Amino acid sequence: MKTGWEFYSEAFNAEALFGFRMLIAWGSLLILLWCVALSALVWRANSKSYENKFMSVLLVCEGIKASFIVSSGILYIRRYEWLQDILWVWTIDVFFVAHITTVILYLCIPMYYRLNKLSFMYKPLLRSHAWYIAPLLALSIYSVLRGHPDFYVADAAWVVCTEGSAATLDMWFGSHQPWMDETVAELGTCAYDFETTITSQPIGLWAIALGSPLISLMALLFIRSSLRSYASGDNPDASQNLSSRSLYIGFVGKVVGLIVWMTLTAVLLPLLHGGPVTFVDETIWRYGADPTTLDRLKYFLWTGGLLLTPAAIAFEAMMFVHATLNDTVFGIDNNLRKAFRTAVFTGLGLVAFIIGSEAMESVVGYGMAGGIMVGLALLAIRRPILNILDRVSSRFIPESHTPEETAYLGAYATAMDDLIITKEERKLLQTVASAYGLDSQTVEKLESEYDASLAEE
């Protein structure tokens, strides 16, 4: 049996795309923890607001959805099968309960954000209960579905390979199935040592996963309708237009990411493969005795597709927090922009390194050289890329202030007409800040922001 050290060291070799999938698994765990922390932050920002409770539950569920492959990054070998028995509950049961919960919560959006055509749902009674009824209802629905064969993973086995020998099967749970033998036969003679799993692929669970982007699209239309109603003056209850806009942008980012993943998984890869693809096919593309360039391309696209959902959910969580805390946490806009810029640049660097390595591996048989060349090229043009990312992030996370902060900025701008603040003007500004309830830290930040804009001009 493989040891933990062998498992992690082999996860970063060329055949495993230099740890691409492992990094996605670890990153998805961080996104889960981030979503849970943000959920707690949103709840504490206004624990009496049903909208905040709704968003907190949604953030937790989205974080769970992002962590689908986290188990593959935690000692995914036979030696620690007992650990995988525990993580399997998270990977399947908890994951799909979260999926169903988000679907229900999406359908509840008109209860929390008024839509003219669905205004009958915008009721205090519904808002006060929907946020906790949704997960309870989802748990009940999944409990019923789980008893149906199309929604239950019944069989799984470890595929064990020793270099130069034929692969063997070691049952994990369920019973031995003919498709398991077919998979082992297709793998052929083992090119190197490895351990992995193959499981049944219930069509019902695939339907839930692939149908989620369509429900997300419906939620996006709900948010857009609420935003347009506010803009036209038909929605007086939506007093925080910026928050609605941030929610809309968050949903746009997530829906785009999920649609791309669905297109990749349900359209592009099947076209390249000649039929539907599953995690069993991924095993053959990765561990096949003599993989072709097309096999490597399909494996790269499949693995890259696993990144899309966590990345899309991380973006959505960031915009949700911007929507909820923008009026209560000064400077959150700038902090979120910096986080977005760093995450995107790092992700681009990782993908570019892998593409360069794969390309060089195909040409000269030494892939690391290509990855290093691409990495150095990215470092050389780092500043222009970061500037572009800054401009992009400023479009969907604009600077914003509360009405009180805006009023103080107006008073400060008037006092700065001659670029000098006199003692009398400073006293007046202190009075204005006190009247609007602005502390010294906020005042200092506002003035620094205005001075910086003057310097740029």
Image: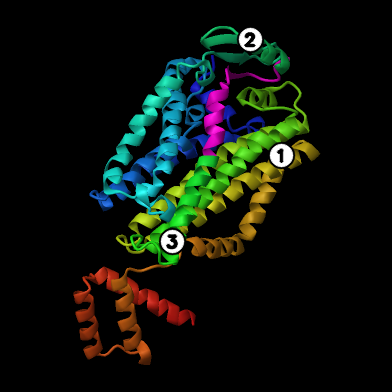
**x, y (%) of residue 453?**
44, 78
**x, y (%) of residue 398?**
45, 65
Q: Which mark is residue 358?
A: 1
Which of discs 3 and 2 lies nearer the camera? The answer is 3
Q: Which mark is residue 229?
A: 3
Please name the amino acid that badge 3 sits on.
Ser
Point out the residue furthest to the top here.
176
What is the count of numbered marks? 3
In this rendered view, identify the residue nearer to me: 273 or 262. Answer: 262
Residue at horizontal 46 percent and vertical 51 percent from the top:
222
Marks 1 and 2, the one that precedes in the sequence: 2
* Mark 3 residue element: helix
In the rendered image, residue 207 lying in the magenta stretch gets the answer yes
Quadrant in which the N terminus appears: top right
Q: Which mark is residue 442?
A: none
Magenta-highlighted residues: 188-213
* Mark 2 residue element: strand
**x, y (%) of residue 14?**
66, 33
Q: Which mark is residue 168?
A: 2
Q: Is residue 417 above or below residue 304?
A: below
Q: Is residue 407 above or below residue 326?
A: below
Q: Residues within 10 Å of mark 3 (few under 14, many from 20)?
A: some
